[in-house]
Amino acid sequence: MSDPVNDNDDHNPYEDAMAAYDRGHLNKAFKLFLAGAESGDVDSMAMVAVMYGAGEGVRIDLHQSIEWDQKAIAAGSELAFLNIAITYRCVGDLVNARHFFERALESGDGEAALQLAKLYMVSDKESETVRKYLHIAIDSTNAFDDTRQEARDLLARGVQRD
């Protein structure tokens, strides 16, 4: 017989996984996120990708990170755009990195603007593009303070603000 006092229909496995992650129990968190991802939870898919990419609770595997981000994106995650872009950059696929940084920016992720600026900083011929993305990062309400500060510092060091 079911016990209505102890049954928790609102139980969220993702929250259990995130609690383990936040406590630094990375092996447990990875297993919980993987179970959620395999059962179709999009947020768990994105976290599995992050953990594969960073080697948290599992051996670093950038190809698995990309695979799980692709699954998360296919399931509707916009948060996976930034992670997959970073992973593509790490494996040297700058075409896909740029594509997914642009998709992340289109979805409102201000961090993506800073990353795009960095991609374009390899050429003096791209200084206008670099400036454009740095301004977007600085003006973004969806970027961390550290991101905005880094964009300001980059402008001050070499790319002048209009």
Image (spheres, helix red, strand yellow):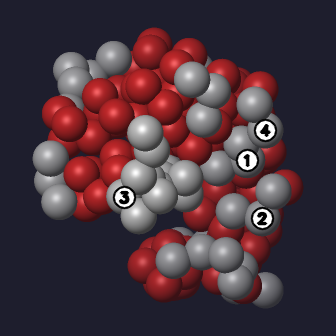
To which residue does mark 2 refer?
108
To which residue does mark 4 refer?
76
Q: Amino acid at mark 3?
A: Asn
Q: CA distance from mark 4 to mark 3?
A: 33 Å
Label 4: few (<14), some or many (≥20) within 10 Å? few
Question: What is the x, y in percent for residue 23?
Answer: 17, 60
Q: Residue furthest right?
A: 106
Q: Nearer the viewer, mark 1 or mark 3?
A: 3
Q: Residue at x 67, y 75 (%)?
A: 142
Mark positioned earlier in the residue sequence (4 or 2): 4
Q: Nearer the viewer, mark 1 or mark 4?
A: 4
Q: Residue at x 15, y 53 (%)?
A: 24
Label 1: few (<14), some or many (≥20) within 10 Å? many
To which residue does mark 1 refer?
78
Label 3: few (<14), some or many (≥20) within 10 Å? few
Question: What is the x, y in percent for residue 49?
Answer: 46, 31
Mark identifier at residue 6:
3
Label 4: element kind: loop
Label 1: element kind: loop
